[in-house]
């Protein structure tokens, strides 16, 4: 569901609220736009693609991570997806109960568990990822190839700068 205020209204209200503070407004508005865009895209992809398959955004990210990297220890999956191990425990239980992932105990340290996609999980990802990508293409269809390349380059720079901190 979109925010009830437009991006321009939110920027104006923010500027009015904090105008007395010494802030970098360009940075604030740029990142506000990033947050808004990320939330809007996430909601659209969840509603359009993931919801019909009874998947949450977080569940999809876990499946995608395991699909790309194969078997991973739970702590690494949680870090890669950006969630706590406790949250991963609940998500993993749900995905396991649906037959989409398997828990593989470590042969070296019984406290460690790895996760991997089951054959059903692989089949699901191969079925829905093209749908997901088609929705991604729809979202960026208003951008020229040059704008998309510039956006991608800028976002990669933000990731690198944020991960260096």
Image: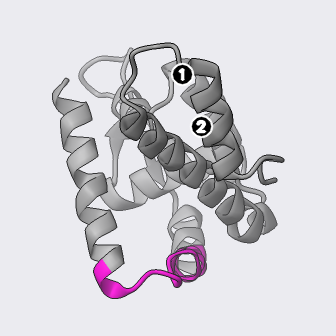
Q: Residue at x 60, y 77 (%)?
A: 135
Q: Residue at x 65, y 50 (%)?
A: 7
Q: Is residue 150 above or below residue 146?
A: above
Residue with the mark numbered 1: 19
Question: Tag 2's secondary structure?
Answer: helix
- Cα–Cα gap, marks 1 and 2: 45 Å
Chain part drawn in magenta: 128-146
Q: Is residue 105 above or below residue 109?
A: below
Who is closer to the viewer here, 158 or 98? 158
Who is closer to the viewer here, 133 or 66? 133
- Which SS type dominates the magenta stretch? helix
Is 158 contained in the magenta span? no
- Locate residue 69 relative to residue 117 in the image: left or right: left
Q: Residue at x 36, y 28 (%)?
A: 24
Res. 8 visible in picture: yes
- Report x, y in % for residue 83: 50, 29
Q: Quadrant of residue 146?
A: bottom left
Classed neighbour count for the residue bearing mark 2: other residues with Cα under 10 Å, few (<14), some (14–19), many (≥20): many
- Report x, y in % for residue 88: 55, 30
- Locate residue 35 relative to residue 91 in the image: left or right: left
Toward the left, the furthest residue is 164
Looking at the rendered image, the disc whose residue lies closer to the viewer, 1 or 2, is 1
What color scheme is it?
one colour
Residue with the mark numbered 2: 92
């Amino acid at each position: 569901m979109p925010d009830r205020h437009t991006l321009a209204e939110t920027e104006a209200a923010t500027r009015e609220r904090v105008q007395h503070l010494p802030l970098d407004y360009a940075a604030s508005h740029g990142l506000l736009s990033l947050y808004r865009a990320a939330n809007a895209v996430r909601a659209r992809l969840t509603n359009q693609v993931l919801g019909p398959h009874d998947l949450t955004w977080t569940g999809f990210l876990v499946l995608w991570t395991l699909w790309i990297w194969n078997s991973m220890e739970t702590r690494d999956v949680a870090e890669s997806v950006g969630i706590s191990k406790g949250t991963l425990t609940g998500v993993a239980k749900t995905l396991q109960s649906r037959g989409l992932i398997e828990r593989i105990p470590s042969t070296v340290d019984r406290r460690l568990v790895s996760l991997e996609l089951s054959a059903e999980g692989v089949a699901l990802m191969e079925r829905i990822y093209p749908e997901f990508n088609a929705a991604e293409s729809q979202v960026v269809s208003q951008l020229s190839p040059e704008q998309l390349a510039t956006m991608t380059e800028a976002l990669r720079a933000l990731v690198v700068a944020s991960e260096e901190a």
